[in-house]
Image: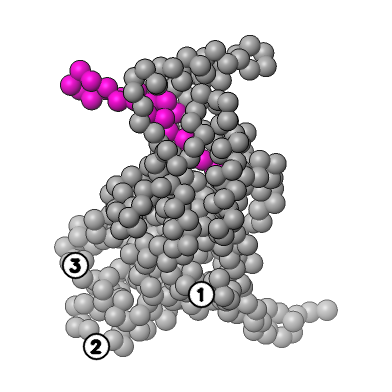
Amino acid sequence: MPKTKKIRKHKQAKIILEPDGFSIHTFELSMKLSKSEWKQIKHALYNERQGEGGNWIYQDKQSGHYICTRYTDAGIRIRLEHNDTGKGESTHFIRMIVNPRKLIYPQSEYLGILPPDEDSIELLEKAFQHLFRHTPFDNNIHRYYLSRVDLCTNIRCSNKKVFRELVRLLRKTATPKKYERKFYQHQDKKKANRYNKHYIRIACGSQELVIYDKTYQMDENGLAVAYENLPDSVLRIEVHYSRGKLKSIEDDARTDDPLDVLWLLIRESKPRIIKLVEKCYPDVPYLSYDEAQEQIRQSCFQSATRERMLFLLNQMQRKQTVDAAFAQMEKQGLATKGLLSKFEKLGFSPIPLRKGYAAARMPSLTEILRSIDKQPATIDLYEWKWK
């Protein structure tokens, strides 16, 4: 029977928070040792033998540090660092990168983030104490200090096209002042370019924001089986704090106990993640090209400003980032200073939705995260179909 009528169909896509909520994914514990203590631990590890007579420790050729693999099944990677200060002296450290969920629940197939409740801290201390009892390492977690913490949340989208569009929009953002955009590096440039379409890393000093398509990252690293319970279209948002930022947090909280600081960061993970997201992404929605173009033309900005805004909007249909579009504009003698703030005043992003996209509006990442633990973010989709 021939198609006779074209109708406009409406449906909604939903972006929801994964059950783990906002919490911590990974942290690094450190301990400074004397030269003799460090050597004693290294020798003890070399004297431990695994199944076929191999060692649990080896020296990494690139860094010169020693890597201990004894506790990887429990979610802990250990590095023994020996650093020359350049003055004929040296420092010695233990670094433990801990996946707390794996440590507490070693049989868990799903390697999610640490459940955001106080019981997690108690279970973490007990698991750490038990794991390192009768080993060369101190099993009192309070004697270590935090040298890195990764705050984390995962959000999932019910519609793969909407999800891919959100990732595309986030990738194109402008790098904020004082921040640096870092790209995934690989000797295969095609692989690096493909990966960077799913991976965003923006850093400033001792903190950085990392956003990536978790499902793609797992497939690329062969982790699909280990993470088989994780659904498709999962976006992971991480905030990484290194030692400088953590020292500032400890000073403000008046404690350097790692468990106290971890519990503080778990409780504050949502506002801290949103705060850094908002610094890197203006809290304005994304509109269709036609709608954004119309709003620019109807604005009260001067004619020259409107022309520059329209030029940027047009460029963002093709350019991979706002930074690249700005470079093109400056090459053509067009001023870019203050241009982004003009878009913010009008209340939308200079990055338009792709042509033919079924929605007229995509909320900002800040808007999504702000209320996602209370209700899903919804995107209205309209498509013409023959009946």
Residue 66 picture quarter: top left
Q: Residue at x 42, y 66 (%)?
A: 271
From mark 2 to mark 1, how far is it between C-alphas?
A: 33 Å
In this rendered view, identify the residue nearer to me: 1 or 53.
Answer: 53
In this rendered view, identify the residue nearer to me: 37 or 220.
Answer: 37
Secondary structure under the numbered disc 1 in the rendered image: helix
Q: Residues within 10 Å of mark 1 (few under 14, many from 20)?
A: few
Whether residue 353 is visible to the viewer of this picture, yes or no, is: no
What residue is pinned by disc 3? Answer: 337
Q: Residues within 10 Å of mark 2 (few under 14, many from 20)?
A: few
96 is within the stretch colored magenta: yes
Secondary structure under the numbered disc 3 in the rendered image: loop
Residue 9 picture quarter: bottom right
Q: Position of residue 86 (x, y in %)?
A: 20, 22
Q: Is residue 303 above or below residue 270?
A: below
Residue type pointed to by label 2: Cys
Q: Residue at x 31, y 88 (%)?
A: 298
Q: Position of residue 175 (x, y in %)?
A: 31, 58
Q: Are marks 2 and 1 in contact (CB under 8 Å)?
A: no
Residue type pointed to by label 3: Lys
What residue is pinned by disc 1? Answer: 371
From mark 1 to mark 3, how far is it between C-alphas?
A: 33 Å
